[in-house]
């Protein structure tokens, strides 16, 4: 049986001046904001309402964030960010990110976010809601 | 009768790399964060608990923000920020800010924030709590 | 003779989570980054190369930034930003901005940036390059 | 022979309102800016001039950034950040960071930055200047 490659989601964003630093490249911390913007667009593409989730008392804190930088991004670059579901666990999801320069397809950075589903009041991790699981499963490399 | 000059409050902060942009100066939007950091230290100096105010249902939205830039700030500059109370009204306060380079006393930027006291639930402007008025009055140029 | 209204430019952007603050609205300083993103898209729409301008030794420092806030923007809002040329002077341009919630057309904030054309080395204001003038003129309310 | 624990450097910083997000905690991306602010203070404590390094043509790009989050930081928290030198290599240094709440000594987050010494023009990694090595060595757990 041949595994089919998992689905991935892609979105683009433009580097704005405020994201650059005095080395005339995008500040390394801004890639994490880019990851999160791609995550938000990914959820939107799934018709997955983050706002609705929040109104039901869930919260999505990040427990780990990693980025490895290969080449700098610069002002006005159009970036393409690919999102994959690296791991889907009972109470957490690990999203993988690849940031490329759209025009040349050069890979600039890779990384991940580990996100926990938590109860807003107790602050404890809780099971990922079933409808979120159902939407993320087709994108998942590992379901644990 | 000679008016005595109003009190002012001064605090310092250091320009971090993330605040710079590709022109190798502090991004203009960061001065507003500097204003707010100075505002927070000003309140702290008055033993004025912003957290307490919030827990009692108040909120301090900004209705106007202005900055005029004279000279750029650069990485690693130690800045001195002076806070004055430009106007103290029934439901709002206008704080004035002067940002200087500490070492040379050069004035880099001036500006103001107009801040309203609002009820968190109704989102309506409400009277500034009396203890806040009492603490701000000694710093006020105009009480309206 | 009836004055025709000046042209304006409109662009949209989505509020990301990192732009919000603990009052669960967009932090006031982020509107200035939104202004600048709209400015960048405005230039792009004019085929006006900011990168080219920079390579020729020009720099576009801001000398004044103002924002007046009417209603808060919140996470996931799609914002429409309108850019107008308020004043076109020999060495500076004043861009006006209106930020509205796209879905409801509610006006959330208005403001402006005063931008100077400067020489990167001397840091002195210089005349706005003719091709930039030519592109901005059709959008200008006042040419001074 | 008993290894003596390596030296570490500690600095404090205050959480400002702009660092918080709509979950009423510090946005996860801001911890990377906190790491960098601590790195800058660490260099300052060593009389290590980053500005001088830059003027000699060096650049310090980050090739990896990791943060693991244990507990949220909130508005007005005074944070204590500890910096250690995890690894000192020929052309790179790995700085470790522990972020604690000063008042309670609770550990909120840990992480690291891997920083390369590069030539500004060629963008190639170069050997860490000897005076930087000499200053970092007393803090280093592993010299490779």
Image (cartoon, coloured by chain):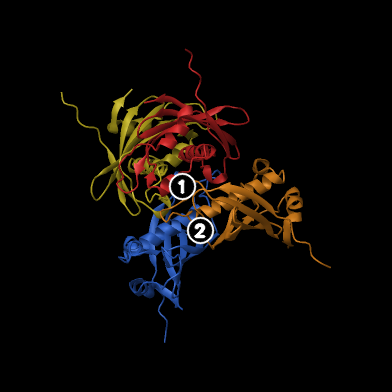
Chain colours: A blue, B red, C yellow, D orange
Question: Helix or strand or loop: what does disc 1 sit on?
Answer: helix
Query: Do tags 2 and 1 sit on the same chain?
Result: no
Quadrant location, the C terminus of chain C: top left
Of all chains, the one bearing label 1 is B
Question: Which is nearer the eye, A118 or A22?
Answer: A118
User: Distance of mark 2 from mark 1, alpha carbons?
Assistant: 17 Å
Number of marks in the image?
2
From the image, tell me which residue sits under label 1: B51
Quadrant where the N terminus of chain C is found in the figure: top left
Left or right, C41 with respect to D72, comes to left
- The disc numbered 2 marks a residue on which chain? D
Q: Label 1 neighbourhood size at 10 Å, few (<14), some (14-19), many (20+)?
A: few
User: Percent from the top left, x then y, of residue D144?
Assistant: 73, 63
Place of residue B60 in the rendered image (x, y in percent of width and height, measured from the top left): 39, 41
Q: Could you tell me if residue D119 is visible in this image?
A: no
Q: Nearer the viewer, residue B133 or C95?
A: B133
A120 versus C93 height, above or below:
below
Looking at the image, residue A54 lies above or below residue A88:
above
Between residue B34 and residue C83, name the one nearer to us: B34
- In the displayed structure, D84 sits above or below D37; it is below
Depth check: B85 or C29 in front? B85
Task: Rate crowding at label 2 as few (under 14), some (14 to 19) or many (20 or more) other CA atoms within 10 Å.
Answer: some
Residue at 58% x, 51% y: name it.
D79
Where residue B103 sits: x, y (%)? 63, 30
Image position of A33 (left or right of C79): right
| Residue C49 visible here | yes
The circle on residue D72 is 2
């Amino acid at each position: 049986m041949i595994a089919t490659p998992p689905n991935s989601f892609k979105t683009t964003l433009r580097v704005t001046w405020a994201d650059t630093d005095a080395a005339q490249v995008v500040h390394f911390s801004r890639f994490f904001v880019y990851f999160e913007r791609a995550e938000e667009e990914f959820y939107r593409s799934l018709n997955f309402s983050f706002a609705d989730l929040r109104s039901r008392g869930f919260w999505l804190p990040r427990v780990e964030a990693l980025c490895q930088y290969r080449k700098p991004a610069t002002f006005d670059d159009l970036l393409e960010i690919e999102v994959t579901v690296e791991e889907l666990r009972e109470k957490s999801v690990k999203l993988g990110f690849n940031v490329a320069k759209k025009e040349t397809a050069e890979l600039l950075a890779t990384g991940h976010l580990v996100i926990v589903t938590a109860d807003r009041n107790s602050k404890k991790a809780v099971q990922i809601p079933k409808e979120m699981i159902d939407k993320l499963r087709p994108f998942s490399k590992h379901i644990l």
